Image (spheres, helix red, strand yellow):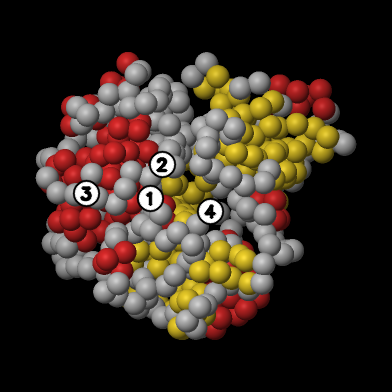
Amino acid sequence: MTDWTSLLTDALEKHGLPGASIAIWRDGRVEVAAAGLANVRTGEPATAEHLFSYGSVTKVITATAVARQITLGKLNLDTPVMDYLPEFAPPDDRARAITVRHLLCHTSGLVGTLFKDTGKNADAIAGQIQLLNEHRLYHRPGALISYCNSGMIMLGRLLDVTTGKPWPQALAEVLTGPLGLETVITTPEQALTWRHVIGHVPGPAGWLVEPVPFFIPGHSPAGSTPMGRVRDLLTIARVHLDGGTAPDGSPFLDPGLVTEMQRQQCRAAVDRQLCGYGLGWMIYEVAGRTILGHDGATLGSNAHFRIDPGSGFAVALAINASMGIPLYEEVMEVVFREALGVRMPGAPAPLAIDRADLAPWLGRYADVMLQQPLFVEDGRLLLETAPNPANTWLHFPPRTIELFVSGPGQFYAKGADALPYAPPRPVTLETWRPFAVFEADGDRYLQSSMLSFRKTA
């Protein structure tokens, strides 16, 4: 059996990362480990009792809290959101069709992310809804998957409204309190009462502590602020693995709703790896198995969460650095091989294709955050990612990666190009990331990691 502490220690050293923690549920028992540093500034060692940032893994927590309110009859999957939130009034009649189900499976058509701070007070999430009221929908509800932080923020607002309490108190009342998860927190004030790691970003001479922890509190239901012990995610996992039963044996979620959450509601345009969405769950295909999970990131952290309903297995991994994916790839390969007897799928074989055949897929794709021209240069298919000039809050230098063709409208990046950032030093990885160009809702889109960018030129 693998010594998880040694594995983490070796992987941290190999990839030059500060700290990490892992928690595994299998055969009715919990295994936990941690290694490295909680904070490079203080030199404090990371332990399994430290709180780590969850990032967008929070979306599973938010979805579970919403499922609890559905179980209690306070929300309904297919009721229009406007019935619950009359404050939601964007200049687009199509918004009347958005339901709770659309929000949970990222098909609402809301603008995906608006990085604008609405303060730290109890009305921070309500302020985000007012920001959405300034924008038309990105696409017709239900037409396609487009990863949507805004939809999860709106679900957080539904928890506010159905409990009559602000998000931190609402989450505690609906989910973390009943499940005994007092170490799952959403504010810096709560974090101060527990041992917690700090995120890290690369600097000119090594890791720097995260400059803006707990970024944009109004985005908390989507993942900007929540932290917890990595093992706490296993409690959430067990509710979903046990048909809605809480670890203490009490009923928590309606069993039929748990089944519905794990059912694929919509399919991604990419034809490999991440294949679609349930309700709150990303759905993966791994060696013939259906794996549910979610990934997350903040400015200075990565988190990863997977469950296998077929075997009752769950794993959560968190890294307190923004460049944690190489460690995730290495550690999860061992976890899946040992626990499930499967290997993570490798990249497909590239197909040779004439430039003329590529022409229908080329062009400029964009959303409110990013612009992504897909073009051919010197015989190579390239994708550039840069901030959309229309936004005033996102700034980074353009980055160009090479794509390989794997089928009609299907592409992938491999190695360092598959990472969502430019690594600060050379890395050797077998990782890969699929992309697709597809038609939906009368437009053409480019999709990667569930993000969909509309063709604009």
| Residue 213 visible in the picture | yes
- Whichever of labels 2 and 1 marks the residue nearer the N terminus, that label is 2
Decide: is 359 above or below 236.
Answer: above
Q: Which residue in the protein does label 3 denote?
A: 122
- Whichever of labels 3 and 2 marks the residue nearer the N terminus, that label is 2
Q: Which residue in the protein does label 1 denote?
A: 216
Contact between labelled residues 1 and 2, with CB atoms less than 8 Å apart: yes
Q: Is residue 301 left or right of residue 271?
A: left
Residue, x 52% and y 16% (percent of image)? 442
Residue, x 43% and y 31% (percent of image)? 111
Alpha carbons under labels 2 and 1: distance apart: 7 Å
Other-residue count near label 1 (Cα within 10 Å), few / some / many at <14 / 14–19 / ≥20? some
Q: Is residue 170 left or right of residue 132?
A: left
Alpha carbons under labels 3 and 2: distance apart: 16 Å
- Amino acid bearing label 4: Val
Residue, x 83% and y 34% (percent of image)? 377
- Whichever of labels 4 and 3 marks the residue nearer the N terminus, that label is 3
- The location of residue 154, given as percent across then percent down, is 29, 38
Contact between labelled residues 2 and 3, with CB atoms less than 8 Å apart: no
- Amino acid bearing label 1: Ile
- The location of residue 366, given as percent across then percent down, is 58, 30
